[in-house]
Image: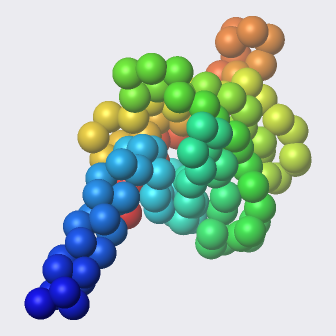
Amino acid sequence: MFRKVSLALAATLIMAGAAWADPIEGNWKTQSGETATIDGGGTFTITLKTGKYAGKTIGSLKAAGDNKYAGNITDPANDKTYSGKATLSGASLKMSGCVLGGLICKSQTWHKL
């Protein structure tokens, strides 16, 4: 009896942990077809998992309210870091990197795997 209760409690805690995860966390398909992982707690780290730059950390974001995130995004091709932001909408994540105070920006839409 005790074992069944323990297993049920463990399963509940595992599912609750997944429910508490921030919706930005997980695996994402980038616009160019690579896979990126976003994980963290207060600060979310973006790491490429596939492609030419696999293993490279390309960003750091913090929650900015209402499915919005802000921080830094690094272009893996030239290692330049830009002011970045992300907006989550369902299973889509719009990522933007900007220079000159937001005057010039590039954006991509990623999809959750």
**Left or right for 25, reference 107:** left
Count of numbered labels shown in the rendering: 0
Compared to residue 22, the image places residue 35 above or below, namely: below
**Left or right for 83, reference 63:** right
Give the position of the N terminus as an image quadrant: bottom left
Point out the residue furthest to the front here: 2
Query: For the point 40% across and 28% down, which residue is it?
Result: 67
Query: For the point 57% across and 45% down, which residue is it?
Result: 41
Question: Could you tell me if residue 36 is visible in this image?
Answer: yes
How did the renderer colour the structure? Answer: rainbow
Q: Quadrant of residue 48?
A: bottom right
Viewer-proximal residue among 45 and 52 = 45
Q: Position of residue 18 (x, y in %)?
A: 34, 59
Question: Could you tell me if residue 106 is visible in this image?
Answer: no
Give the position of the C terminus as an image quadrant: bottom left
Q: Position of residue 28 (x, y in %)?
A: 47, 57
Query: For the point 36% across and 58% down, which residue is it?
Result: 17
Q: Position of residue 106 (x, y in %)?
A: 63, 29
Q: Position of residue 5 (x, y in %)?
A: 17, 80
**Left or right for 48, reference 15:** right
Viewer-proximal residue among 102 and 62 = 62
Compared to residue 53, the image places residue 85 above or below, namely: above
Query: For the point 29% across and 75% down, which residue is it?
Result: 10
Compared to residue 12, the image places residue 3 above or below, namely: below
